[in-house]
Amino acid sequence: MAAGDVLRSFASPGTDPHGITWDGRALWICDRDLDRIYQIDPETGLVLRSFPSPTRTPQGLAWYGRTLWHSEAYTDRIYQLDSVTGLVLRWFPAPSGDPTGLGWDGRTLFNCNAMSDLIYQLNPVTGAVLRSYAAPGTNARDLAWDGRGLWIADIVANRVYLIDPETGIVLRSFASPAAGLFGVGWDGRSLWVCGTTNDRLYQVEAA
């Protein structure tokens, strides 16, 4: 198997899938048309639960303990949500307008931004920017932490990049099978990507 090869695919629960994250057993995805967040079975694609986004234009998701980090572009905020009820536990302003993808490395939060074309490392308590660097490509839409590096989904290049989280240097990349690439997530062994052209999720080889 080569990087980017499709392992499985199924339809998204909504019609405009964006950020993806993994909670240890299931996938989470947000949908911009329906303004909802879904937990889905990674084997079948069936919806396990869902709740509305706290506001319009949901974009990014990252899993943290029993909560979700969630970014949205209507108010340019990053929220921490209860993963059972969807209730907002707290929020802080995003470092720039149009915050897109989110990633959690166990200590800090990463946010990529389509307006500034930057990746920000954030203090998860205050939202303060710890560092920033240029994203690969020209329109970063989502990111995922794999334990060592950051995966970035770029919709213009329609590529997935693996970058060094300290420097932003690209380590490798591959073409996405999902056109209209808006989401990338890591499940501990492989990557998940989603596209808005055909509203499907793909599990793909990362190596």
Image (cartoon, helix red, strand yellow):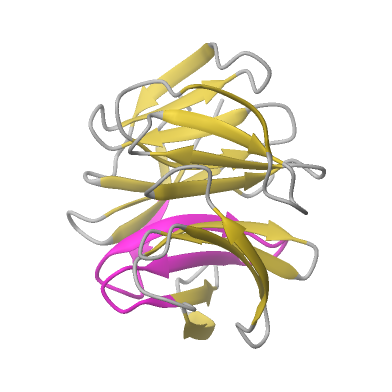
Q: At 27% from the left edge and 37% from the top edge, which residue is drawn?
A: 155
Q: Is residue 9 magenta?
A: yes
Image quadrant holding the C terminus, namely top right
| Residue closest to the eye, 30 or 6 | 30
Position of residue 61 measured from the top left corner of the image (x, y, whole percent): 54, 58
Can residue 193 be seen in this snapshot?
A: no
Task: Examine the rendered structure and indicate whether residue 125 appears above or below residue 56.
Answer: above
Position of residue 11 measured from the top left corner of the image (x, y, whole percent): 31, 67
Q: Is residue 37 magenta?
A: no
Task: Examine the rendered structure and indicate whether residue 13 appears above or below residue 73.
Answer: below
From this viewpoint, which residue is outermost toward the left? Answer: 197
Q: At 33% from the left edge and 38% from the top edge, which residue is drawn?
A: 115
Along the horizontal axis of the image, is 121 left or right of 184? right
* Picture quadrant of residue 181: top left
| Residue closest to the eye, 14 or 107 | 107
Can residue 34 be seen in this snapshot?
A: yes
Q: Which residues are magenta?
A: 8-36
Position of residue 22 measured from the top left corner of the image (x, y, whole percent): 63, 58
Q: At 78% from the left edge and 54% from the top edge, which residue is drawn?
A: 125
| Residue closest to the eye, 204 or 114 | 114
Q: At 46% from the left edge and 28% from the top edge, which residue is drawn?
A: 118
Task: Examine the rendered structure and indicate whether residue 154 appears above or below residue 125.
Answer: above
